[in-house]
């Protein structure tokens, strides 16, 4: 699913494809978190943040894109409270 989403998101102007890639990374983040692998979970959440930002840049009026970005940022912080907060601050649009 990730590979298909990456291929579709290769066009930076395809906001919906960027959204699907970010959503796939958010979904992928859940498995390592349940096994207490915080580093891998944080990496997947961060990997989803970039396409979420691109989706927002192309269609800032879409509330779902904002929700997903907020959820991804919220997943970075629990993995590493201090550094996660700093990373989220840097990711904000």
Image (spheres, helix red, strand yellow):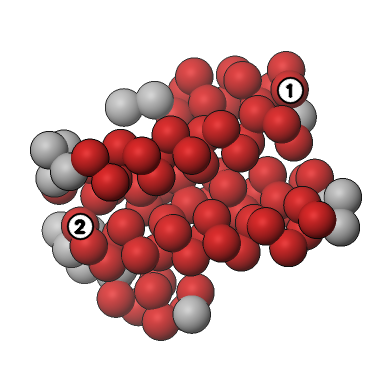
Residue 9's label in the rendered image is: none
Residue drawn at the location 56% of the way across and 62% of the way down: 27
Give the quarter of the figure containing the C terminus: top left
Q: Is residue 76 visible?
A: yes
Q: Quadrant of residue 85?
A: top right
- Image coordinates for residue 57, horizontal then vertical, percent: 19, 41
The structure residue drawn at horizontal position 74% and vertical position 36%, both measured from the top left corner, is 79
Q: How many marks?
A: 2
- Mark 1: few/some/many CA within 10 Å (<14, 14-19, 20+): few
- How packed mark 2 is, by other alpha carbons closer than 10 Å (few <14, some 14-19, many 20 or more), is many
Residue position for label 1 = 81
Residue 3 in the image: above or below residue 86? below
Q: Earlier in the sequence, mark 2 or mark 1?
A: 2
**How far across and down, in percent of the image, does residue 47 sit?**
53, 52
CA separation in Å, label 2 and label 1: 30 Å
Q: Secondary structure at mark 1?
A: helix
Which residue carries the number 2 mark? 15
Q: Is residue 21 above or below residue 92?
A: below
User: Residue 69: where, in percent of width, then height?
Assistant: 40, 39
Do labels 2 and 1 touch, CB within 8 Å?
no
Along the viewing direction, whichever of 43 and 61 lies nearer the viewer: 61
Residue 36 sits above or below residue 28 on the image? above
Q: On the rendered structure, is 51 left or right of 77? A: left
């Amino acid at each position: 699913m990730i590979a298909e989403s990456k291929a579709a998101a290769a066009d930076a102007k395809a906001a919906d494809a960027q959204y699907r890639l970010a959503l796939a990374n958010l979904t992928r983040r859940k498995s390592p978190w349940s096994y207490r692998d915080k580093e891998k979970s944080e990496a997947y959440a961060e990997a989803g943040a970039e396409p979420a930002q691109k989706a927002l840049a192309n269609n800032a009026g879409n509330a779902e894109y904002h929700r997903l970005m907020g959820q991804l940022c919220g997943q970075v912080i629990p993995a590493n409270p201090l550094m996660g907060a700093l990373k989220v601050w840097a990711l904000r649009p």
